[in-house]
Image (cartoon, grey):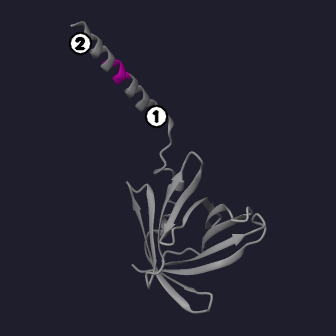
């Protein structure tokens, strides 16, 4: 009988602790999904046709399908070139603690890239710092700009002088499919 009584008290104690933790957490943690900034990437939601010039000046095309998943808290990207030679995915979320967007990109070349950033005026800028094989660092960034309901420009840029100057590596013009 005494063992049953102790087990009941232990269960009650754990329940009170769990409830207190849940209430405290609900009161102190901002909701990443409902913060006003959490809708800044909504311009990107939809199906897009992308076109760009390759290094030989030939126009190439791809498709990018962007959706909100996981309770509309995460922006999911699915990119592929028309010939399917390059396929990639990203997940992007607004981190209200850090007051920044965070993105993880992976693709069929085995790349893993992590970005942070946010709106800078009327541009969405996501950047990352990477260590090169020779020990030096390089900055990379994606810049979404000239954003309208049905199209926008996207640049992939790099900098070897800590962001003082940027070199354009890839420019895609996106047009909404639907």
Residue that extends furthest to the left in the rendered view of this protein? 1
Q: Is residue 131 above or below residue 168?
A: above
Residue 47 placed where, x, y %? 42, 75
Q: Which of marks 1 and 2 is nearer the N terminus?
A: 2
Residue 31 placed where, x, y %? 47, 45
Q: Is residue 53 above or below residue 67?
A: below
Q: Which of 61 and 121 is in front in this view?
A: 61
The residue at which mark 2 appears reads as: 4
Q: Per the image, is 13 magenta?
A: yes
Q: Per the image, is 123 magenta?
A: no
Q: In this view, does 7 lie to the left or right of 99?
A: left
- Crowding around mark 1 (Cα neighbors within 10 Å: few <14, some 14 to 19, many 20+) is few
Identity of the residue drawn at 56% across and 74% down: 147
Residue 25's label in the rendered image is 1
Q: Is residue 65 left or right of residue 112?
A: left
Q: Which of 149 and 105 is in front in this view?
A: 105
> Which quarter of the figure is the N terminus placed in?
top left
- Helix, strand or loop under label 2: helix
- Crowding around mark 2 (Cα neighbors within 10 Å: few <14, some 14 to 19, many 20+) is few
Q: In this view, does 149 lie above or below 28?
A: below
Identity of the residue drawn at 62% across and 70% down: 143
| Mark count | 2
Residue 69 placed where, x, y %? 39, 59
Identity of the residue drawn at 43% across and 81% down: 84
Of badges 1 and 2, nearer the viewer stands 2
* Residue segment shown in magenta: 12-16
């Amino acid at each position: 009988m005494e063992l049953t009584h102790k087990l009941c008290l232990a269960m009650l104690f754990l329940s009170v602790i769990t409830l207190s933790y849940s209430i405290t957490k609900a009161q102190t943690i901002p909701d990443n999904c409902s913060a006003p900034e959490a809708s800044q990437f909504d311009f990107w939601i939809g199906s897009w046709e992308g076109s760009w010039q390759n290094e030989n000046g030939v126009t190439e095309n791809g498709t990018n399908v962007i959706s909100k998943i996981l309770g509309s808290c995460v922006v999911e990207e699915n990119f592929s070139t028309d010939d399917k030679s390059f396929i990639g995915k990203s997940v992007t979320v607004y981190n209200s603690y850090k007051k920044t967007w965070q993105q993880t990109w992976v693709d069929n070349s085995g790349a893993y890239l992590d970005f942070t950033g946010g709106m800078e005026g009327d541009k969405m800028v996501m950047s990352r710092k990477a260590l090169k094989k020779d020990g030096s660092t390089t900055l990379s960034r994606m810049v979404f700009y000239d954003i309208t309901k049905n199209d926008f420009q996207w640049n992939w840029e790099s900098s070897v002088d800590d962001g003082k100057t940027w070199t354009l590596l890839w420019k895609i013009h996106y047009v909404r499919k639907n």
